[in-house]
Amino acid sequence: MEEKMYWGMTSRTYCTVIHLSQLTSFIIPGLGLILPIVLWIANKDQDEAINQHGRVTANWLLSLLVYSVICMVLAFILIGFIGFAILGLLNLIFAIVAAMKANNGELWPYPLSIQFFKG
């Protein structure tokens, strides 16, 4: 039986791309928030794995947004700048770990992620 393709990729590869796509923010600010959510929404009803990976990624991205707002407020007392650096590093590490797990067919819920979308 032939595996269904999503934008020319297998489900496993597509899930990997969902996680890695958030790193596009390092090139174009904001794209790493929009692209993974668009990838998720485009095919979430077609494949349960895509829905699960997109959901955990969206939960992390929204959590990251909340943590960034907190760091912005804390920047007035300078500690927020350290928080931003930590968030950037965590985002990089978490995206790579989640992508590697997705490539192996595993779902990895991001640590520190607030569950906005339950599954």
Image (cartoon, rainbow, N blue to C red):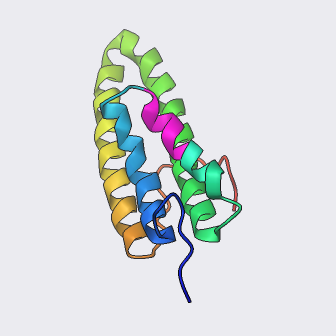
Residue 101 spot, x, y in % from top left: 38, 69
Q: Residue furthest bottom?
A: 1
In the rendered structure, which segment of residues is drawn in magenta? 30-37
Q: Residue at x 57, y 55 (%)?
A: 54
Q: Residue at x 50, y 23 (%)?
A: 69
Q: Residue at x 69, y 62 (%)?
A: 119
Residue in the picture at 53% in, 79% down:
3
Residue nearer the viewer, 81 or 43:
43
Q: Is residue 111 visible?
A: no
Task: State the image coordinates of residue 48 (x, y, percent, origin top left).
Answer: 64, 69
- Report whether residue 53 is seen: yes
Left or right: where does residue 6 sit relative to residue 71?
A: right
Residue in front for this viewpoint, 41 or 118: 41
Q: How many numbered discs sit on the rendered protein?
A: 0
Where is 4 relative to 31, above or below? below
Which residue is most to the top? 76
Vertical placement of residue 70 versus 42, above or below: above
Q: Quadrant of residue 106?
A: bottom left
From what the image shows, is residue 33 above or below residue 111?
A: above
Closer-to-camera residue (111/3): 3
Residue 112 magenta-highlighted: no
Q: Position of residue 38 (x, y in %)?
A: 58, 43
SS assignment for the magenta stretch, majority = helix
Residue 33 belongs to magenta span = yes
Quadrant in which the N terminus is drawn:
bottom right
- The percent position of residue 8, horizontal first and vertical second, equals 47, 62
